[in-house]
Image (tube, rainbow, N blue to C red):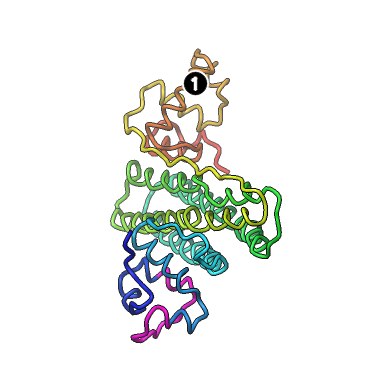
Amino acid sequence: MKEKYSKDDKMNEVLSSGERLLQVVSRFDIPLGVGDKTIEQICNENSIDVKTLLAVVNFTYSAGEIRPMQGEIDLSALCSYLQNTHIYMLNFFLPHIRRHLIDALGASSDNDVTFLIIKFFDEYCEELKAHMETEDKKIFCHIDELKQGKPFKNLSTESSKMHTSSTEAKLSELKNIIIKYYTSSSYNYMYHILQHLFICEYDLYIHNKLESCLVMPEVRRLETLNASKQPLQDEEPLQPQNEEMLTDREKDIVAGVVKGLTNKEIADKLFISVNTVTTHRRNIAKKLNIHSPAGLTIYAIINKLVDIKGIKID
């Protein structure tokens, strides 16, 4: 694979190429005012490993393609980059999206749906925060121990927690709900919000791919040196779901779920088996691409499958 940038290219060319690479350079704590200096010169001035920076820059530019680089990158520099991504996401970008989301939804007359969408977004942010804090407090600490030559029991198991698809699915659900089911006179504002959600999604996609394609191979290499190697398994990618209308029976199932009924209670109410309820719920999730009770609640209210008065909102 031919890489876009090399150490002899000008750093200003990287910074001028677009938002994505601008974010990459900023997360290496490189100040602006780079003049006509090369990438290598700027890295040397800021005590940054040039191979590591180029690996991330070219990885981001190519949307996740990279040649094997075991033993060539500075794992400390890469972990610092990932931690700076956490800071940017949690302290700036996600709060920024939330403020705009509140402003956009404020024009809606349906306060209950507005509340639920904000709540859904907040739950997503909390899940992402918990995931990133786990990386900061545990995974990166374990990597430091590996670099020091210390064996760590079950480090591969801990390291595999770096990648998770649960938060990706929740963000996808939120976009799906807004695109397919939310109507408002402030639709231009909502398009703006969706644009930010897509940027966030891509940023986190590259973040996770960096962990899988750059961090994890280096961790495994160090594990081999320090202890016995334990192969990791990557999670299966999410598959696109069919978009179909719900049947009347499926609508009844959705109504029962959002009212807080158990599968057994829904089955008794509709005179069907629990196994049939489970099958219907699986089909509903595939059709709507909504997998959480919170998401189903928003869908049900927007589509008037239930009365808001019959739902307990914490």
Q: Locate the C terminus by quadrant.
A: top right
Start-end of magenta stretch: 23-41
Q: Quadrant of residue 239?
A: top left
Tell me: 308 left or right of 190: right
**What residue appears at the point 67 percent right and 56 percent down from the top-left corner?**
226
**Residue matched to label 1:** 277
Tell me: 152 left or right of 41: right
Front-most of 185 and 176?
Answer: 176
In this rendering, the answer to whether 91 lies above or below 286 is: below
| Image coords of residue 120 (percent x, y) | 49, 47
Q: Which amino acid type is shown beneath numbered disc 1?
A: Val
Label 1 packing within 10 angstroms: few (<14), some (14-19), many (20+): many
Q: Is residue 31 magenta?
A: yes
Front-most of 61 and 103?
Answer: 61
In this rendering, the answer to whether 215 lies above or below 109 is: below
Tell me: 189 left or right of 161: left
Residue farthest along the top direction in this orientation: 271
| Image coords of residue 187 (percent x, y) | 29, 53
In this rendering, the answer to whether 269 lies above or below 226 is: above
The secondary element bearing badge 1 is classed as: helix
Front-most of 310 and 52?
Answer: 52
Q: Is residue 65 magenta?
A: no
Give the prevailing secondary structure in the magenta stretch. Answer: loop
Residue farthest along the front direction in this orientation: 225
**What residue appears at the point 49 percent right and 45 percent down from the top-left corner?**
165
| Image coords of residue 118 (percent x, y) | 47, 51
Q: Locate the N terminus by quadrant.
A: bottom left
